[in-house]
Image: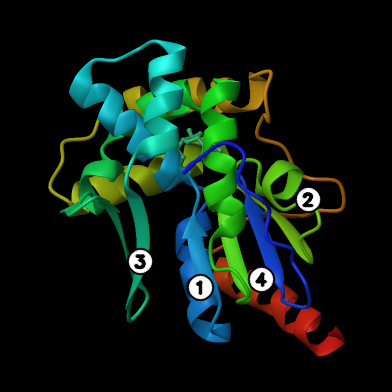
């Protein structure tokens, strides 16, 4: 990946941008919509997490070093079928390693650096070239695909998002302290929304979907209904 890569024009295809804070259900909702409509899917957070993982492993913290990692890492994101997606760094599958809480925190820190963000932009814009596409992240609707056909800001209360994340961690057999989790999520939200470059925000024209009182199935349906309406129009 290099910083200066050309942007692939959107053309006639449909691009759906889903942004929002951690734990709002973006991943599950996007996977379900991708399966329903045959869209390509990219979890853009995986790119920032991959940089965070390499930074954690190598101990590198300098901006130029991190930007270089972002520009040269052999990152790949692949659909495995049946709604499963996997992230790779070269030959190594890092899907699970990327989910670790400390890697999420490291991702949020490296994501504040404009040099890192610039280095990751080309990959996000080229991904799924020519196909109908759904992407989730923090700045997809504001920076990556500002001309997306549909922009959604998926959110939920901090407590509800922490409760969902706690369940996910417990299912993986990890010990959870809910109070600590809430504090760490609040810290990450504040960093992601408060940074100077491409802060997490609902894009102009985005539909805000608050999933606090919704089941996962209801959240998926809310987004699927919007995409279905879009497809009927086009
Ligand atoms: O969506 P996630 O939790 O996997 O993202 C991890 C971090 O990466 C998040 O805290 C902020 C950063 N990120 C970003 O800055 N921009 C994106 N489009 C996606 C993620």
Q: Is residue 21 visible?
A: no
Q: Residue furthest left?
A: 173
Binning the other alpha carbons within 10 Å of mark 2 as few (below 14), some (14 to 19) or many (20 upward) gives: some
- Mark 1 residue element: helix
| Whole-number angstrom distance, CA of label 3 to CA of label 1 | 24 Å
Dot 4 or dot 3, earlier in sequence: 3
Q: Position of residue 9 (x, y in %)?
A: 74, 63
Going 33% across and 81% down the picture, which residue do you hit?
A: 82
Residue ID for mark 2:
146
Q: Nearer the viewer, mark 3 or mark 1?
A: 3
Please indicate whether residue 161 sits to the left or right of residue 210 in the image. Answer: left
Kindly report the distance in space between the C-alpha atoms of the residues bearing marks 4 and 3.
26 Å
Q: Residues within 10 Å of mark 4 (few under 14, many from 20)?
A: some
> Cβ(mark 3) to ligand 1 < 8 Å?
no
Q: Which mark is residue 222?
A: 4
Q: Secondary structure at mark 3?
A: strand
Tag 4 secondary structure: helix
Q: Along the line of sight, which residue is nearer the eye, 86 or 126?
A: 126
Which quadrant would the C terminus be assigned to in this image? bottom right
Give me the C-alpha separation between circle 2 and circle 3: 24 Å
Classify mark 3: residues with Cα within 10 Å, few (<14), some (14-19) or many (20+): few
The residue labelled by disc 1 is 217
Q: Is mark 2 within 8 Å of ligand 1?
A: no
**Left or right position of 143 against 213:** right
Which structural element holds mark 2?
A: loop
Q: Nearer the viewer, mark 4 or mark 3?
A: 3
Q: Evaluate if marks 2 and 3 touch, with contact meaning CB atoms under 8 Å apart.
A: no
Q: Which residue is mark 3?
A: 78
CA separation in Å, label 1 and label 2: 28 Å
> Tags 4 and 3 in contact by the CB under 8 Å rule?
no
């Amino acid at each position: 990946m290099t910083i200066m890569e050309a942007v692939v024009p959107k053309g006639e295809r449909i691009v759906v941008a889903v942004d929002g804070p951690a734990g709002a259900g973006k991943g599950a909702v996007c996977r379900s919509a991708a399966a329903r409509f045959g869209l390509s899917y990219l979890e853009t957070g995986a790119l920032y997490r991959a940089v965070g993982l390499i930074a954690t492993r190598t101990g590198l913290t300098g901006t130029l070093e991190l930007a270089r990692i972002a520009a040269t890492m052999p990152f790949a994101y692949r659909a495995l079928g049946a709604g499963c997606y996997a992230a790779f760094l070269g030959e190594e599958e890092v899907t699970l390693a990327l989910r670790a809480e400390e890697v999420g925190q490291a991702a949020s820190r490296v994501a504040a650096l404009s040099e890192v963000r610039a280095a990751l932009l080309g990959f996000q814009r080229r991904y799924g070239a020519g196909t109908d596409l759904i992407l989730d992240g923090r700045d997809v609707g504001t920076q990556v695909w500002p001309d997306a056909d549909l922009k959604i800001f998926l959110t939920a209360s901090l407590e509800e998002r922490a409760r969902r994340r706690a369940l996910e961690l417990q299912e993986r057999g990890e010990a959870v302290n809910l109070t600590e989790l809430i504090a760490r999520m609040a810290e990450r939200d504040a960093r992601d929304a408060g940074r100077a470059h491409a802060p997490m925000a609902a894009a102009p024209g985005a539909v805000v979907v608050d999933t606090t009182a919704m089941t996962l199935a209801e959240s998926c349906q809310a987004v699927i209904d919007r995409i279905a309406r879009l497809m009927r129009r086009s």
